[in-house]
Image: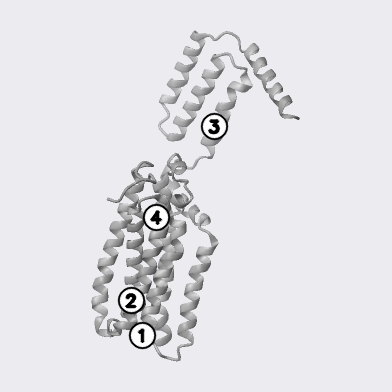
Amino acid sequence: MTRMRRRQVEELVRAHYRAERGAPDAASKARALAAVRAVAAHRASDAGAGAGSCAVEGASACASGLPRPVADAPARACARAVEGAPSREASFAAFVAAQARFIRPRVWAAQLALVAVMVAACAGADGMSSGFSFASGMLAAATVLVGLPDLLASAAHRVAELEYACRFDCRAVALARLIVLGCSDVAVITVLALAAPVALGADPFASLVHVCVPYFLSCAGALCAARRSPSMQTALPLACAWTLLVMAAAYAAFLFAPLAYAQASAWAWALVAAASLLWAVHEAHAWLRRIAGGIDVLAPDRTWR
């Protein structure tokens, strides 16, 4: 069918329905709307409210003179949507679980590769634990680095405005991805922190704080950079740059101040880890609050504040 013939068919169909519509009956329309609204008012659940609004649309179309199959189409479509819609009470947990399917496989592959590198290094160390403190910290920061593109995907792919119009808006998507990636990071950090103590007999507490400090600093600084970025397109590069800076600082500390990784400084690392954790929690809350501000807050021409 050519484009001209398709247009002619559409015009003939519209002319047919205009001829068959007839004159609207205002009294019948008013009675139908009153009856449907009375039934919809007794529906307390969201599904009932959705079905009531769909019935109002169908009744309006029928009372205005449209053919019955055309008038019933909105009601049938909305009824199917209402029947298939999950309950609001349990839906967010399912939504968070479903977000794991949208994290790209290369993120999981990269995290497994980081774990494999740490395990292989410990297996071939011949009982020497020197240098594994800073190595585990750099790998922990790299865990944040591989997850940042998927965490900030809404801004990078310019779909934030579309997500704001959905039932689970842009803030819900960001929170769900933060939960999913955070759970996977916990598993990776646990393996990184226990690899040296289990394989080489290193101090577990020192190994844990040496991993946590770069990780929390990377999380906090990346979220701060993303939140304060002048545009959505620069959020990811700034967050990645901060994470690389943390990794470089960990390596520089091992080269130029090796005493910082001594056993006696473990409690100082613990204090820094606690402060970094508080900073990361604050930045995560501020980042989600900024996203909840709406699309105007995420405008590309936004200035630093």
Spatial CA span between label 4 and label 3: 42 Å
- Give the answer, above or below, for where 265 lies relative to 215: below
Mark closer to the chain start, 4 or 3: 3
The residue tagged with tag 2: helix, strand or loop?
A: helix
- Give the answer, above or below, for where 304 lies relative to 148: above
Residue behind mark 1: 202
User: Of the residues shown, which amino acid type is indicated by label 1?
Assistant: Ala
The residue tagged with tag 1: helix, strand or loop?
A: loop
Mark closer to the chain start, 2 or 3: 3
- Quarter of the picture containing the N terminus is top right
Tell me if mark 2 has few (under 14), some (14-19) or many (20+) residues whose alpha carbon lies within 10 angstroms of its own.
many
Circle number at residue 235:
4
User: Of the residues shown, which amino acid type is indicated by label 4?
Assistant: Ala
Residue behind mark 2: 210
Spatial CA span between label 2 and label 1: 12 Å
Residue at (49, 29) in percent of width and height: 51
Spatial CA span between label 1 and label 3: 62 Å
User: Of the residues shown, which amino acid type is indicated by label 3?
Assistant: Ala
Foreground disc of the pair 4, 1: 4
Mark closer to the chain start, 4 or 1: 1
The residue tagged with tag 4: helix, strand or loop?
A: helix
Mark closer to the chain start, 1 or 3: 3
x, y percentage for residue 18? 62, 14
x, y percentage for residue 233? 43, 52
